[in-house]
Image (cartoon, rainbow, N blue to C red):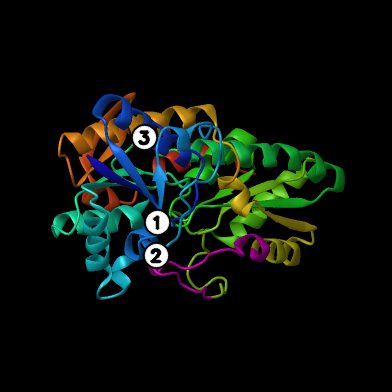
Amino acid sequence: MHIGVLTGGGDCPGLNAVIRAVVRKGVADYGDRFTGFRDGWRGAMEDLTMPLDVEAVRGILPRGGTILGSSRTNPYATEDGPSRVAKTMAELGVDALIAIGGEDTLGVAAKLTESGTAPVVGVPKTIDNDLGGTDFTFGFDTAVHVATEAIDRLHTTAESHHRVLIVEVMGRHAGWIALHSGLAGGANVILIPERPFDIDEVCAYVERRFASHYAPIIVVAEGAAPVAGTLSVRQAEKDAFGHERLGGIGDLLAREIEARTGKEARATVLGHTQRGGSPSPFDRWLATRFGLHAIDAVHDGAFGSMVALRGTDIVRVSMAQAAGELKTVTPELYAEAEIFFG
């Protein structure tokens, strides 16, 4: 078979491991040939390609990012987008696609498959770990490691200067990174999108921490928001999929805490450092297994499916269902973390 591969959405540690596994197994076990589409769905729409063979994927396992490039291009944002994807595939003689991405990339893949425009198998990718249907997505473990190391380092400077230090991490709709890194790093307050925060309650935690002669560390997900009507949060621009470009909640918290408590407060925004650099061993392992199973799914004709982790097994689930389900932090999990607040 002639199989196309693309990576869409934000870059993520482990993408290259998937590409490597797909190509290595496809060539060795099935005699496949591969074409890589550059920059996500843009490449499939505009015929931007690169050859993918065993030589092209040598040495890429530990590399961050993606050798194929990525973008947030949405074929359904234009009337002829899907037909351009089909035309590109037909002209190149590509029989099927493996799309590696998050809810947006896989949402497009599901629509293309359901409409008969293109046969696609999905591989889940997001550092936010908020994609339904899979226990974990690769990239998440690396992001948590980066955030936890930053929190560990900030404890010492917080204590030295008697400051409130706020660590803003990624997490648009789900607070998995904030929850995991906050617990692992010994944060005193963790704020997540699933639970609107009360700024007065946050300030009370800050005061309580200082009363015990320690400086507080607050971890906040970028999508966390105050209880409605309590604080003014600026409106953000939107991308091609209609998602707001977030950021700034850490600075807002720092200003409010300093004004309300009189304690010096500073915000550190980890931003893209969380999804850059080499993937962790777990993410390399998971991404590689996803790639191996994705190529099997193509040859089984399991189009419209997504490979997923359930326990320690790799299974297939509905791509449309997975892309449409947002996996969020439950109240029970958040309650576990609240024991350590203040």
The magenta span reads 235-252
Give the left or right position of residue 100, taking residue 305 as reference. Answer: right
Q: For the point 57% across and 74% down, which residue is it?
A: 232
To which residue does mark 1 refer? 40
On the image, the x and y values in percent for residue 105 come to 34, 55
Q: For the point 24% across and 59% down, which residue is it?
A: 91
Which three-letter amino acid code belongs to the residue tagged 2? Thr
Give the left or right position of residue 276, taking residue 300 as reference. Answer: right
- Mark 1–mark 2 contact, CB under 8 Å? yes
SS state under label 2: loop
Magenta segment: does it hold 241? yes
On the image, the x and y values in percent for residue 268 come to 70, 54
User: Which of 28 and 123 lies nearest the eye of the viewer?
Assistant: 28
Spatial separation of the CA atoms under disc 1 and disc 3: 17 Å
Residue 186, picture quadrant: top right
SS state under label 1: loop
Q: Earlier in the sequence, mark 1 or mark 3?
A: 3
To which residue does mark 2 refer? 73
Q: Earlier in the sequence, mark 2 or mark 3?
A: 3
